[in-house]
Image (cartoon, helix red, strand yellow):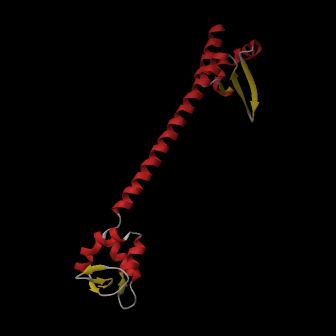
Amino acid sequence: MENKKSKLIEYLRNHGGSIAKSKVKWASDVLDDLENEGKIKITKKGNGYTIELLDNEARTEESSLNKEVKKETKENGDIITILNEINKKLDIILQKLGFSNIDFDKIFEEVKNPMGIAVLKDIRERMGLSKEEFYSKYSSYIELHYQMFRGGDEGIVKNGTIFGIIKR
């Protein structure tokens, strides 16, 4: 009988201190004795009964499990924080890398008028780049792939003339 009681208590400890009564049918004859001794508590939940271990050792194990869960949650929070920092740094890197020539062509298609003419200032503003970034990055590409026309508030300077209007 004592052997069965100790097995039941050990079983409850291994399962977090609380378990359904239907899981321990093999020890049903000692349940009343353990409840009278104050080692377990049997409560009705829904359609069944739950057995809860009342000794301090189970609570100690349970609290250590809670500590582990809290530690894992904290570690997950740390991981999320680190991932957010990595994402922010990647965003900064991608902004610095900027647009490709394909992006320039897409924006040209959006900005051009019905005659196929676009102002470089409008393209630059749509891309969100500074004058230095835009013209240092795209001036050679524009010269190779587009016809340039004089005019505009800003553009590529050649022989003292500002070429700020382009066409394919």
User: What percent of the width, then of the height, locates residue 37?
Assistant: 75, 12
Residue extending farthest to the top is: 2
User: What percent of the width, then of the height, locates residue 92?
Assistant: 40, 56
Q: Is residue 67 above or below residue 102?
A: above
- Tell me the quarter of the picture where residue 6 sits: top right
User: What percent of the width, then of the height, locates residue 49?
Assistant: 73, 29
Q: Is residue 84 above or below residue 104?
A: above
Residue located 33% across and 61% down the image: 97
User: What percent of the width, then of the height, locates residue 138?
Assistant: 29, 72
Q: Is residue 32 above or below residue 168?
A: above
Residue extending farthest to the bottom is: 115
Q: Nearer the viewer, residue 30 or 77?
A: 77
Left or right: 136, with 66 as reference point: left
Left or right: 8, with 159 as reference point: right
- Tell me the quarter of the picture where residue 66 sits: top right
Q: Nearer the viewer, residue 131 or 74?
A: 131
Q: Is residue 121 above or below residue 78?
A: below
Indicate the quadrant containing the C terminus: top left, top right, bottom left or bottom right: bottom left
Residue located 57% across and 28% down the image: 67
Q: Nearer the viewer, residue 84 or 132?
A: 132
Residue located 44% across and 52% down the image: 88
Indicate the quadrant containing the N terminus: top left, top right, bottom left or bottom right: top right
